[in-house]
Amino acid sequence: MVALRIALTCIFIVVSIALLVVVLLQEGKSAGLGAISGAAETYWGKAKGRSMEGMLVKFTKALAIAFVVLAAVLNINRF
């Protein structure tokens, strides 16, 4: 049981660092509002799921879910 806890803790640390990096790689919501407008925004709006930013958003959601689940699992036997 101790080995499983150590393995889960190591995975939790890796997920935490990956989540931090992915969040820092994302652009802010207000990025590109100055010069880019109109047709450029609609083009990127259509292809958002396939763009790099779309993939970062999906990866962030998956890492956040893994973070919460691992945190809950690691704290089950604390009480």
Image: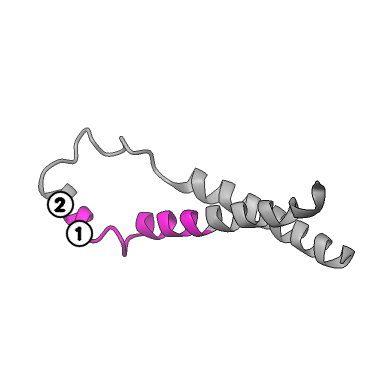
Amino acid type, residue under disc 2 in the picture = Thr
- Residue 35, quarter of picture: top left
Q: Position of residue 46 (x, y in %)?
A: 20, 59
Question: Residue placed at 80% from the left, 53% from the top?
Answer: 77
| Placement of 75 over or under 8, stated as above or below | above
Relative to residue 25, is residue 5 depicted above or below? below
Does the stretch in magenta take in 18? no
Q: Nearer the viewer, residue 73 or 40?
A: 73
Nearer to the camera, 51 or 63: 63
* Residue 61 x, y percent position in the rendering: 47, 55
- Badge 1 is on which residue? 46
Residue lying farthest front?
79
Left or right of residue 42, residue 67 in this image: right
Q: Are marks 2 and 1 in contact (CB under 8 Å)?
A: yes
- Residue 7: image quadrant is bottom right
Q: Which residues are magenta?
A: 42-62
Residue 47 horizontal side relative to residue 6, left or right: left
Please state which of residues 48 and 2 is positioned toward the viewer in this rendering.
Answer: 2
What kind of residue is marked 1? Lys
Q: Residue at x 31, y 38 (%)?
A: 31
Real-space Cα separation, disc 2 to disc 1, in angstroms: 6 Å
- Quarter of the picture containing the N terminus is bottom right
SS class of the residue under badge 1? helix
In the rendered image, which residue does mark 2 sit on? Answer: 42
